[in-house]
Amino acid sequence: MIIKILGSGCKKCVALGENAKTALQAAAIDAEIEKITDVVAISGYGVMSTPGLVIDEKVVSTGRVLSASEIGGLLKNK
């Protein structure tokens, strides 16, 4: 599983990354977390509002910081 955090590296993007890491640990899932900061790459996902969360190349959230429990729910659906 590959999780991507899309954003400029702002405070909200960092928080989303930390919440994703927490959710993975709680679910005992081994996954790679990538941070994508390139604006062209981000727009390639169709994301116009950051932070964005991508799980296995599917955009699952944009424009808000999901909690660890919200991310955990998305991971269970995978």
Image (spheres, grey):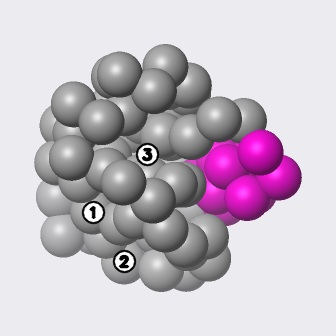
* Residue 44 coordinates in the image, percent (x, y): 21, 31
Amino acid type of the residue that numbered disc 1 sits on in the rendered structure: Val
Residue 56 visible, this angle: no
Query: Disc 1 to disc 3, how far (Cα)?
Result: 18 Å
Relative placement, left or right, of 38 versus 57 is right
Q: Which of the two discs, 2 and 1, labels the residue nearer the N terminus? A: 1
Q: Is residue 36 left or right of residue 42?
A: right
Q: Between tags 2 and 1, which lies in front?
A: 1
Q: Is residue 75 left or right of residue 65?
A: left
Helix, strand or loop at label 2? It is helix
Kind of residue at badge 2 = Gly
Callouts 2 and 3 close, C-beta under 8 Å = no
Q: Is disc 2 surrounded by few (<14), some (14 to 19) or many (20+) residues within 10 Å?
A: few
**Discs 2, 1 touching: Cβ within 8 Å:** no
Q: What span is colored magenta in the figure?
A: 10-21
Which residue does the numbered mark 2 point to in the structure image?
A: 73
Give me the residue at 55% from left, 72% from top.
64
Give me the residue at 36% from left, 66% from top: 61
Tell me if residue 76 comes above or below residue 59 in the rendering. below
Which tag, 2 or 3, sits closer to the chain's start?
3
Dot 1: what SS?
Answer: strand
Q: Amino acid at mark 3?
A: Ile
Look at discs 2 and 3 and give the one toward the viewer: 2
Quarter of the image where one finds residue 41: top left
Task: Name which quarter of the figure residue 68 lies in.
Answer: bottom right
* CA distance for labels 2 and 1: 11 Å
Task: Tell me where residue 63 appears, x and y as whole percent.
Answer: 49, 68
Numbered label attached to residue 29: 3
| Numbered mark located on residue 60 in the image | 1
